[in-house]
Image (tube, rainbow, N blue to C red):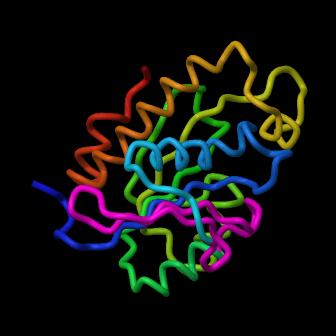
Amino acid sequence: MSFFQKKQTVLIAGLGNPGRAYRQTRHNIGFMLMDHLAGEMDFTFSRMQHKALIAAGRFQGHKIILAKPQTFMNNSGQAVGALMRFYKLSLENMLIVCDDVDLPFETMRLRPSGGSAGQKGMKSIIQHLGNQEFPRLRLGIGRPPGRMETADYVLQKFAAKDSEILDIYLRRAGDAVIRFITDGIEDAMTSFNRTP
């Protein structure tokens, strides 16, 4: 049985930076997951809406909107807030996906609410919504090595040696998002909030 009422609209927004220079960087793992989910759901990113690249369709009896804000990470709230208002969504019908340097690579954390934890895209969303009571999925990318600045680290591309692990990680994160849609945040947390 689906967690959400049938025919409800669910927004899944993955955070990142637009443009070729940022593809495959650690900061863009939210975008990578949106691309993976689009493939799983047989959706296509084909249009811009409210400063976000959108892929939408029917999945598990719901209208699902996958969004990649094109405002750059630090202004993600502009797009997410506009989409929430346009579709008249309640906060629990949204899931935000972002990177997290405080979690080891391959580790994910689903939460029903919380602060920004220093993630600037999440901070922007909280500011634009005036609320932090919404579900989020944090994807760990690990801490920078040595004395490397965090800003430099997150804008680095994933190493070639991590590509196979990254594929597995994205598949598992995609499964977590689908579980969120089908069974709700609590069930998804129980199943996926563990170290691999």
Q: In the displayed structure, would residue 113 be above or below residue 5?
A: above
Judged from this view, the residue extending furthest toward the left is 1
Q: In the displayed structure, would residue 13 be above or below residue 32?
A: below
Total residue callouts: 0
Quarter of the image where one finds residue 101: top right
Q: Specify whether residue 179 is painted magenta.
A: no
Quarter of the image where one finds residue 8: bottom left
What percent of the width, then of the height, locates residue 93?
35, 69
What percent of the width, then of the height, locates residue 43?
44, 55
Q: Specify whether residue 73 is painted magenta.
A: yes
Left or right: residue 149 compared with residue 25: right
Picture quarter with the N terminus: bottom left
Picture quarter with the C terminus: top left
Left or right: residue 8 compared with residue 123: left
Residue at the (37%, 35%) spot, across then down: 193
Judged from this view, the residue extending furthest toward the top is 161
Quarter of the image where one finds residue 45: bottom right
Residue at the (76%, 57%) spot, across then down: 18
What percent of the width, then of the height, locates residue 189?
32, 42
What percent of the width, then of the height, locates residue 163?
64, 20
Residue stretch in magenta: 48-77
Q: In the displayed structure, would residue 121 be above or below residue 51?
A: above
Residue at the (82%, 34%) spot, across then down: 156
> In this orientation, which residue lies closer to the viewer: 83 or 119?
83
> In this orientation, which residue lies closer to the viewer: 149 or 156?
156
Left or right: residue 11 compared with residue 116: left
* Main SS, magenta residues: strand
